[in-house]
């Protein structure tokens, strides 16, 4: 199985919208704070473009099997060193369900890390829903470690 990872093109728009919808629906199944994928896919896609994100597509034999997106970011936290505040932020990583468990997500993370390092990043940051155990396990396998943990509590 040979995975090709390449930069997205305008021709990939519909595929990316489908992947974003699937990703949003998967998160929506985990937490009720998420809106339906059909409602936000276009907004998310336009947000990636507006952010100047690197968007990479994974293909196997010409079939689109996943994507990753990220950009250079700078936190505004004055308590952190300037070097720590500047980082590569991975906003999305998705592998189609039938292709999971084959290391494609790891290859996508490696590829976006390489791209963002070329643009000046010295580290990567990524977020996951606390209840998304498979994503967190995949991120830990890649070498990510918790940095900050946000707690949430509804008020009655």
Image: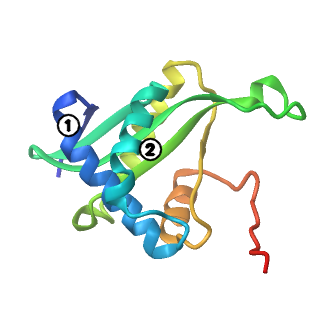
Element type at mark 2? helix
Of marks 2 and 1, which one's residue comes earlier in the chain? 1
Residue drawn at (60%, 25%) of the image: 121
Note whether 107 is above or below 134 in the view shown: above
Classify residue 120 as left or right of residue 93. right
Residue drawn at (52%, 18%) of the image: 119
Percent coordinates x, y for residue 107 in the rendering: 37, 45
Question: Is residue 115 at all visible to an observer of this figure?
Answer: no
Query: 15 or 122: which is nearer to us?
Result: 15
Percent coordinates x, y for residue 156 in the rendering: 78, 81
In the picture, the disc for residue 74 is: none
Classify residue 70 as left or right of residue 131. left
Look at mark 2 in the image and give the residue it sits on. 109
In the rendered image, the residue lying farthest to the right is 79
Look at mark 1 in the image and give the residue it sits on. 12
Which coloring applies here?
rainbow
Question: Is residue 74 at all visible to an observer of this figure?
Answer: yes
Element type at mark 1? helix
Query: 42 or 123: which is nearer to us?
Result: 42
Classify residue 95 as left or right of residue 51. left
Dot 1 crowding, Cα within 10 Å, few <14, some 14–19, many 20+: few
In the rendered image, the residue lying farthest to the left is 61
Residue drawn at (27%, 47%) of the image: 17
Query: 92 or 119: which is nearer to us?
Result: 92
Classify residue 137 as left or right of residue 60. right
Dot 2 crowding, Cα within 10 Å, few <14, some 14–19, many 20+: many
Query: How many angstroms separate mark 2 from mark 1 (CA)?
Result: 19 Å
């Amino acid at each position: 199985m040979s995975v090709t990872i390449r930069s997205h093109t305008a021709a990939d728009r519909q595929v990316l919208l489908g992947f974003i919808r699937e990703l949003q629906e998967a998160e929506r199944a985990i937490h009720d704070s998420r809106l339906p994928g059909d409602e936000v896919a276009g907004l998310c896609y336009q947000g990636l473009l507006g952010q100047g994100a690197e968007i990479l597509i994974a293909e196997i034999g010409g079939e689109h099997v996943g994507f990753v997106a990220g950009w250079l970011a700078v936190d505004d936290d004055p308590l952190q060193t300037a070097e720590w505040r500047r980082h590569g932020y991975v906003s999305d990583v998705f592998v189609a369900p039938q292709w999971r468990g084959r290391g494609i997500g790891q290859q996508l993370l490696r590829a976006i890390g390489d791209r963002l390092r070329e643009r000046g990043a010295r580290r990567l940051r990524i977020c996951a829903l606390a209840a998304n155990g498979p994503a967190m396990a995949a991120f830990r396998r890649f070498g990510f470690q918790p940095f900050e943990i946000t707690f949430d509590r509804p008020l009655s």
